[in-house]
Image (cartoon, helix red, strand yellow):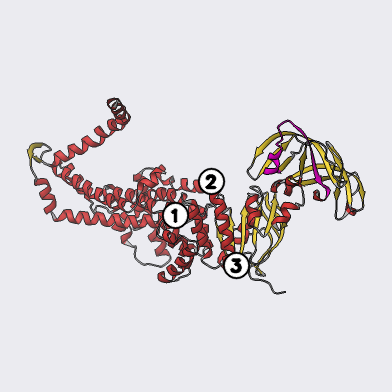
């Protein structure tokens, strides 16, 4: 098998700082030219992984391969990686052009040559008119473009981005998000992006890696992590799901019947029923937008499940309305109703309703 | 209302004014006035305006020699303290990972200051003297067969003592400046492929400019205004601006002494102004 030049492989990588294990045995393969997002709360080890790929931190154990070559111990330049730092770390005493040209300067390129290359890169990120400014005179979005240009100037195989959007305000963040994706397609190289914002991750990434406490919980395509989370942690971190604690009542063929607090006889299809036994505790996930609300029990087919609930709060969200139910057991229960549908016959806070969903839409978590 | 806010404003600055006027402004005015008076040669000053003191000063060849000599000491000391101070501060800030250890080592730099200036100077004598430690080691190892005479009571000894005394004044502002450098910019430079030397050259050095300027002000103005180190360490072989001034005072010729004090003040102020032009000191102090 021909190994692509910008693919990254982490094999049993772990990192300890004193007694603290920041990264706890991570195995992962990121294909060449992919946009990969590491997603997790602060302290989950995602930045440490990024820094180990970049060469700013050495793993305590394991191997890191870039383009099939073990890069542990190599300096960043030899890895052909470039990093875009959190809050950018631009050189405050150098002009935008000199910031971008810095890597070329230390490679010994003449002033005229490096300025030519830097100006071409500035044009690519659309900040040509700022070339002579100092970083302190730029807005957050402009600084980000400079940081991106500075990182991309060396034509790296892999670009590593540490929370690149966290210093920006909401509107700019969405704009720069599109920009990042455009740049990645443009450059055609692997991007590894660390974030704690799930919206950012699923909007950008080909591969989303959800992490918790130094371990990978799920690494999959954005749609898979969102729609088919592997466990409760991933489902809750990505959001958009209701996760109920249930108990398996019976297993029959391709589906199981579960019950929980305030619910019973709920049918859920499973792919491998052999691994589930009755009496087992499981987590049941149903997407918030897959649930319908009714005033009276609907007469739907046998493959529909329903439970009773009381509306606790209603939040208008624009495209949809967020209806918050009273907790089911200890878990929150939220339904997203399409905006138009909601206002045909609006529900009131305090109303008792029936929530129903098609059995196929429910998911049993590991 | 504006009268009241004016009063309040004056009240706010009054403590500083109360210190500055009697201890700074008045002495300078006294010296300035004295420099324009005649003297009777026995410690008395005659209240008669004259430019004679300045004329003597500017026509004397000695003045130029003294200034050149002192400026030479100042520049040599400046280079020495800058080289040593920069590397010590750089090491403490960027290479000592444990911050507690860095602060501990930083305090260690101040240990020599726990003893008096004179003791610190005298302690060079057994080290640099004809039968001193350096000479006897060099002779016993056969590197030289005659003691090196330039080690003590020489310009070399003066500059050595100055560097010993003043390096800390370079370390402190440099340490402060370098501590403010975001460590991630260093990493970013490393990420771009800069070697350790290139990081110092292109990132650390330009970003510690303010610290260098502050340290330079301390070192240069102290050397320019000193006579004691020159006197002791040169063994009386060299003189400085202030030592000539001190001679005037000891023979009770106050107006000529006042005139050379005023000239020195102007020269030092010009030096400091020149240094301040290269950096925005307010940026550093204000943050």
* Frontmost residue, A49 versus A290: A290
* Residue B264 seen in render: yes
Residue at the extreme front: A344
Q: Dot 1 falls on which chain?
A: A
Give the CA separation, mark 3 to mark 2: 45 Å
* Frontmost residue, B16 versus A46: A46
Residue A151: which numbered mark, if any? none
Q: Dot 3 falls on which chain?
A: A
| Side of A47 relative to A97 (left or right) | right
* Residue corresponding to mark 1: A135
Q: Earlier in the sequence, mark 3 or mark 1?
A: 1
Which image quadrant for residue A310? top right
Magenta span has A162?
no
At numbered mark 1, what does the secondary structure look like: helix, strand or loop? helix
Q: Is residue A221 above or below residue A293?
A: below
* Frontmost residue, B18 versus B7: B7
Give the CA separation, mark 2 to mark 1: 32 Å
* Residue corresponding to mark 3: A188
Image coordinates of residue A86 in percent, x first then y, are 55, 53
Image coordinates of residue B149 in percent, x first then y, are 31, 61
Bounds of the magenta span? A337-359
Q: Quadrant of the N terminus of chain B?
A: top left
Q: Dot 2 falls on which chain?
A: B
* Residue corresponding to mark 2: B100
Which image quadrant for residue A160? bottom right
Q: Are marks 2 and 1 in contact (CB under 8 Å)?
A: no
- Same chain assignment for discs 3 and 1: yes
Question: Tag count in the figure?
Answer: 3
Q: Are marks 3 and 2 in contact (CB under 8 Å)?
A: no
Count neighbours of disc 1 (C-alpha within 10 A) and say few if under 14, some if 14 to 19, many if 20 or more: many
- Same chain assignment for discs 3 and 2: no
Q: Is residue A1 above or below residue A41?
A: below
């Amino acid at each position: 098998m021909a190994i692509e030049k910008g693919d990254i492989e982490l094999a049993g990588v772990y990192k300890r700082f004193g007694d603290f294990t920041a990264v706890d045995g991570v195995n992962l393969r990121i294909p060449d030219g992919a946009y990969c997002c590491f997603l997790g709360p602060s302290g989950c080890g995602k930045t440490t992984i990024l820094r180990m790929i970049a060469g700013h931190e050495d793993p305590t154990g394991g191997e890191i391969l870039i383009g099939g070559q073990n890069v542990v111990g190599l300096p960043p330049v030899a890895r052909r990686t470039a990093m875009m730092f959190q809050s950018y770390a631009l050189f405050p005493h150098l002009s935008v052009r000199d910031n971008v040209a810095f890597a070329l300067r230390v490679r010994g390129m003449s002033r005229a040559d490096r300025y030519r290359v830097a100006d071409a890169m500035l044009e690519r990120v659309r900040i040509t008119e700022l070339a002579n400014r100092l970083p302190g005179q730029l807005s957050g979005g402009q600084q980000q473009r400079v940081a991106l240009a500075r990182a991309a100037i060396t034509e790296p195989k892999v670009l590593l981005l540490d929370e690149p959007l966290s210093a920006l305000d909401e509107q700019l963040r969405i704009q720069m998000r599109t920009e990042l994706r455009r740049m990645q397609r443009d450059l055609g190289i692997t991007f590894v992006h660390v974030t704690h914002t799930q919206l950012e991750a699923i909007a950008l990434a080909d591969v989303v890696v959800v992490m918790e406490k130094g371990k990978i919980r799920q690494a999959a395509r954005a749609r898979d992590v969102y729609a088919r989370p592997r466990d409760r942690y991933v489902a809750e971190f990505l959001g958009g799901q209701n996760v109920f604690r249930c108990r398996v009542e019976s297993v029959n063929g391709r589906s199981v019947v579960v019950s929980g607090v305030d619910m019973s006889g709920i049918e859920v299809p499973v792919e491998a029923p052999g691994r589930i036994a009755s009496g087992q505790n499981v987590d049941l996930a149903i997407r918030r937008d897959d649930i319908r609300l009714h005033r009276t029990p609907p007469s739907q087919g046998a493959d529909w499940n329903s439970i009773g609930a009381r509306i606790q709060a209603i939040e208008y969200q624009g495209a949809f309305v967020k209806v918050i139910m009273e907790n089911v057991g200890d878990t929150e229960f939220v339904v997203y109703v399409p905006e138009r549908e909601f206002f045909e016959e609006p529900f009131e806070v305090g109303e008792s309703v029936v929530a129903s969903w098609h059995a196929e839409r429910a998911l049993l978590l590991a | 209302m504006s009268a009241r806010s004016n009063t309040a404003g004056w009240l706010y600055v009054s403590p500083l004014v109360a210190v500055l006027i009697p201890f700074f402004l008045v002495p300078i005015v006294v010296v300035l006035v004295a420099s324009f008076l005649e003297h009777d040669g026995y410690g008395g000053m005659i209240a008669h305006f004259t430019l004679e003191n300045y004329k003597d000063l500017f026509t004397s060849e000695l003045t130029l020699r003294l200034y050149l000599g002192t400026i030479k000491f100042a520049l040599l000391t400046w280079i020495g303290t800058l080289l040593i101070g920069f590397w010590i501060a750089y090491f403490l800030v960027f290479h000592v990972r444990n911050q507690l250890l860095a602060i501990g080592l930083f305090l260690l730099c101040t240990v020599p200051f726990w003893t008096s200036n004179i003791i610190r100077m005298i302690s060079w004598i057994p080290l640099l003297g004809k039968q001193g430690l350096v000479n006897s080691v060099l002779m016993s190892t056969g590197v030289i067969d005659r003691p090196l005479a330039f080690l003590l009571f020489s310009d070399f000894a003066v500059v050595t003592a100055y560097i010993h005394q003043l390096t800390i004044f370079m370390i402190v502002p440099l340490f402060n400046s370098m501590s403010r450098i975001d460590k991630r910019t260093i990493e970013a430079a490393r990420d771009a492929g800069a070697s350790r030397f290139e990081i110092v050259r292109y990132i650390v050095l330009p970003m510690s400019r303010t610290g260098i300027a502050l340290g330079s002000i301390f070192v240069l103005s102290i050397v320019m205004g000193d006579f004691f180190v020159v006197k002791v360490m040169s063994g009386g072989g060299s003189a400085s601006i202030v030592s000539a001034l001190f001679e005037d005072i000891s023979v009770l010729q106050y107006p000529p002494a006042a005139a050379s004090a005023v000239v020195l003040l102007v020269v030092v102020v010009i030096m400091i102004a020149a240094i301040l032009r290269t950096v925005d000191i307010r940026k550093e102090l204000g943050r």
